[in-house]
Amino acid sequence: MEPKIVTIPMRDGVEIGVAIYAPKDNAQSKDKTLGNGKYPALLAASPYRFDNNTLPASPQFLWRETGPIEFYQAQGYAYVHVDVRGSGRSGGEYEFFGKNEVQDLYDVVEWIAKQPWSNGKIGTIGQSYFCMIQWFLGALNPPHLACIGAHDGLNDLYRAICYQGGIPGYFFPGHWWYQNRLINRYPATGPAREQTPDLEAMIAAHPTYDDFWRERAAFEMGERVIAPIYSSGVWGKITLHTRGNIDGYRRARGPKKLRMSGANNAWEAAAEFADVEFHERVWLPFYDHYLKGKSSSYETRPNVEYEVRGSKLTRSSDAWPPKNTQYRAWYLNGETSGSVTSLNDGGLSATPTPTNHTTSYRYPDPHWVAGVVGFAPGGPAAGYDPVRRVLTFTSAPLEADMEIAGPIKLVLFASSTATDTDFYVKISAQMPQDSEARAKGVNPPADLVSRGWLRASHRKLDDMRSSEMEPHHTHTNPEPIVPGRVYRYDISVEPMAYLFKKGQRIRLEIVNGDSPITEGAYWAHYYRPNQIGEDTIHHSAEYPSALILPVTAS
């Protein structure tokens, strides 16, 4: 799989490194329809450098997100892999999705179209970063961009990961930036490359949604995308990409379809995208249709197709959310569920409690040992218990299966002794538990369904972009809260399709932090030293705090 490596001069004189993996000749190719030496091209771009493509596309190397290059060569496609400026063999400084980085791809698309081996049709390919940059390229609409294969990529850097709910995250300025520099410094082949920008300082200098982030928010220009697009998301990536694929699909104005994979996490998602069978079934029909003009199974696919987590079901729909979605409220109350050991063990019910009731907790909790996680019964030797030292509100066992698909919202009425606080929200399907384990205080097993985040000072809604079920916060001018005053917070929880089974309980968890124990090294947030105080959740007829779920009608 030896590519031809070339450099392409950009409009400002910077030279961009490109690896061209030529299609196999017609005698070898599995596609016998290409006989004139003119081939379509698949364009992939990232800062992970094409010199690392000799490594296996395995979950060990999560950033090896090109898909199976040799498979597409055998199908009669030229695979063109770009090192974005400031990485690999490309000149210039790395810009973290800046305007020059995006404009470079426009120039590369038009350069490909002029090559003697090109049929003038270029599509995009790739996962995560490879996908994120496609949203921008689609909005630029280069004349020879024939289709966009957007797999597993966010389109709003600020809200999706760098400042979730206005809360600064660790992933991009910490883990990702260290990893990216390592990838460039010690490639599998090729010369070393040092990247000098201070990404941590760059992100920290912009804690609110300002012009820096608007330049890097593809969702701001999503309506400009007119090329045919197949947006393919992953339910297991709710801490990073999931909402981006749904939002990108909904905003695009050209021919479009959406599919959502049930892969449970980043490693499973990486293995899925590296798998040849996945590309034969999902992606090749899309590219063949738009880049070769062939009739394929893509034409008969539904507009929306999604797996339902917690089951083996796959559903189809004309739109997202599905038209048979009915939004059902589960109200927080002070009644004891008796099903879980937590700071409060509150309840969820179909109607708001008529009496005034509140639930309070002080922080930092003296029993937290790793972020907001405590020890299980028996202390350190028994291991960690993520639920024991947080607030929970849990329903009674469900009397029948309940399937959800769509956006999720938490309406929370709360006050604090501090001038600012954070809300970390988790929704779980809590499994049945035998009485003996419950008597010992061992918490029941649970399956995480979705997450949400909001910093109290970032509560202001963008009325133009918000809808009843999808609150969109401006994050432009944080407003401190008045200690003791009750505020309403509309918290957007990541969209999901999930089957709660009969006998399971819906569990809502609320606390002001998270933990590397539960979020892993990538997705956790730092607990600030000045997070000291007491928060109170209000739940009554006057303050009807409620979790609103998108229940699909049978």
Image (cartoon, rainbow, N blue to C red):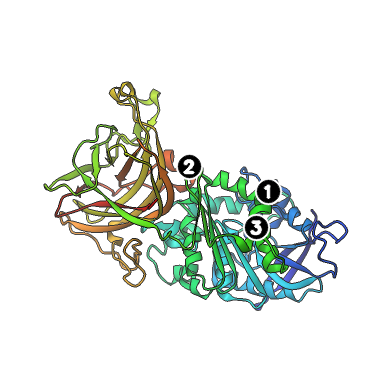
The image quadrant that residue 282 belongs to is: bottom right
Looking at the rendered structure, the secondary structure element under dot 3 is: helix
The extreme right residue here reads 27
Query: Are the residues tagged 1 and 3 within 8 Å (C-beta)?
Result: no
Can residue 384 be seen here? yes
Identify residue for label 1.
277
Tell me if residue 180 comes above or below residue 447 in the rendering. Answer: below
The extreme left residue here reads 355
Q: Earlier in the sequence, mark 1 or mark 3?
A: 1
Identify residue for label 3.
283
Identify residue for label 2.
311
Residue 236, x across and y down, in percent: 49, 48
Question: Real-space Cα distance between discs 2 and 3?
Answer: 24 Å
The extreme front residue here reads 554
Residue 488, x across and y down, in percent: 22, 58
Number of residue marks:
3
The image quadrant that residue 458 belongs to is: bottom left
Q: Is residue 427 left or right of residue 350?
A: right
> Which amino acid, by three-letter code, is at mark 3?
Trp
